[in-house]
Image (cartoon, rainbow, N blue to C red):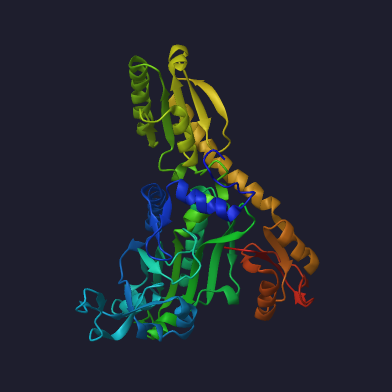
Amino acid sequence: MSKGITSRGTDYSQWYNELVVKADLAEHSAVRGCMVIKPYGYAIWEKMQAALDKMFKDTGHSNAYFPLFIPKSFFSKEASHVEGFATECAVVTHYRLKNDGSGQIVVDEEAKLEEELIVRPTSETIIWNTYKGWIESYRDLPILVNQWANVVRWEMRTRLFLRTAEFLWQEGHTAHATREEAIEETERMLGVYADFAENWMALPVIRGRKTENERFAGALDTLCIEALMQDGKALQAGTSHFLGQNFAKAFDVKFTARDGKLDYVWATSWGVSTRLMGALIMAHSDDQGLVLPPKLAPIQVVIVPIYKTDEERQRIGELADNLLADLKAMGITVKYDDRDTHRPGFKFAEWELKGVPVRIAVGTRDMQQGTVEIARRDTQAKETVPQQGLALRVAELLEDIQRSIYDKARDFREAHTTTVDSYEEFKRVLEEKGGFVAAHWDGTVETEQLIKEETKATIRCIPLDNKEEHGVCVRTGKPSKQRVLFAKAY
């Protein structure tokens, strides 16, 4: 490879790791397991954030912010929740450093906290302790709050964007007067995530329900969207949880209902993270670099001039200025790359690596003939088109690229979703083909765990549109009422 990126077919994991770094998305930091998100990578995250933030606000939610530190005692109030996160928590025990007299900075043992603080792995406990002071009656409900924040889960095996000790996310936390309202909210937000994944990320997803074993710690029900990456592994792209009254009971959050009776509040939580960056890369990119859907590309169009003289450069620059104005007026982000420190071939390769959806090249012959060359990143197809009406042509092309990227990912998922009826076929498909495997399961945690131990495949979800289908479990032969989706996963 001229750009030095390992081929997906040779080593998919290495391809991903190299692409994240060489496309200037992120790099490893001095803190083990943490990452630095570089400007180009953060620009993509900002576009994700802006789109999602508008969707949240359009569905009635407001943003707030809660503390990074959570008293350890808060976690003790909801047993299943603390059990789910106990092994991943970073704990603050002291509040001061001192010089030991030899020039070394050490922890001041006399500055020990009375109660240890947990660096938030998620915020249900601190938020529900706060909500207790906000809620007295049904008139105070619903509370529809989201926060954009960082969280820490002390991962030992990390990979940029997919699994890091600290990552960025949003977490919605809502409070409701009835069970029905909370369930409706849980389903609504799953729909928001699916809409974003498919219409912005060009990522087809399956909406489903997690098994009891895979459910969020402290939830009564977890809904999810599952996507398939190009190596045949699944990736959980978003979750929405119905928490019932568990956290309200743990923090004694009661309200006076319309009938005058006291009741515990009903809760939900939902979130997506910078893991979506990993999904975006792995679902669409190729051996030449990133392939970005236009809606999330920081730069949607790049214009590269090809010239030999200053006069030619000036003439092409005048055309570029007009085109820049036309495209910006249409809401399209565009860059004119007239750097004289790099040759056109280098620029082509650089913007291809960074996944810019459309590249426009303009040379002296193009100026004479009134044309330009347009190259689309997704298929690498090129065409020569007239300069007249170019902005409209680019806008149409961006829409087509967005749609085509989605269609390609959907076709891949459909080609890699296999229905099996025997355990032998189940194992063979996982090893040789990968992807989603639709199989009967007897509904027990024991069988689910056994299959995971034997094949490394987990139940990704029970699809929400599942049809009842009587059969027998592929592993135990016991009765089953429906198929579930298995896959190896990130």
Residue at image location 73% in from the left, 72% down from the top: 481
Q: Position of residue 100 (x, y in %)?
A: 22, 79
Residue at 70% in and 50% down: 415
Residue 304: x, y in percent? 42, 28
Q: What is the count of numbered marks? A: 0
- From the top left corner, tell me how far across and down residue 199 is, in percent: 51, 48
Closer to the camera in the image, 121 or 30: 30
Q: Residue at x 57, y 60 (%)?
A: 235
Q: Is residue 50 above or below residue 309?
A: below
Can residue 280 be seen here? no
Q: Quadrant of residue 72?
A: bottom left
**Along the viewing direction, whichever of 248 and 455 lies nearer the viewer:** 455
Which of these two is toward me, 239 or 302? 302
> In which quadrant of the rendered image does the C terminus lie?
bottom right
Image-quadrant location for residue 90: bottom left
Give percent across and percent down for residue 326: 37, 28
Work out which quarter of the rendered image holds the N terminus and state it: top right
Please report the residue visible at 46 percent of the width from the left and 45 percent of the height from the top: 23
Q: Is residue 402 above or below residue 164?
A: above
**Residue 289 in view in this figure:** yes
In the visual, does 122 lie left or right of 4? left
Identify the image quadrant of residue 62. Answer: bottom left
Residue positioned most to the top = 368
Position above or below: 264 against 231? below
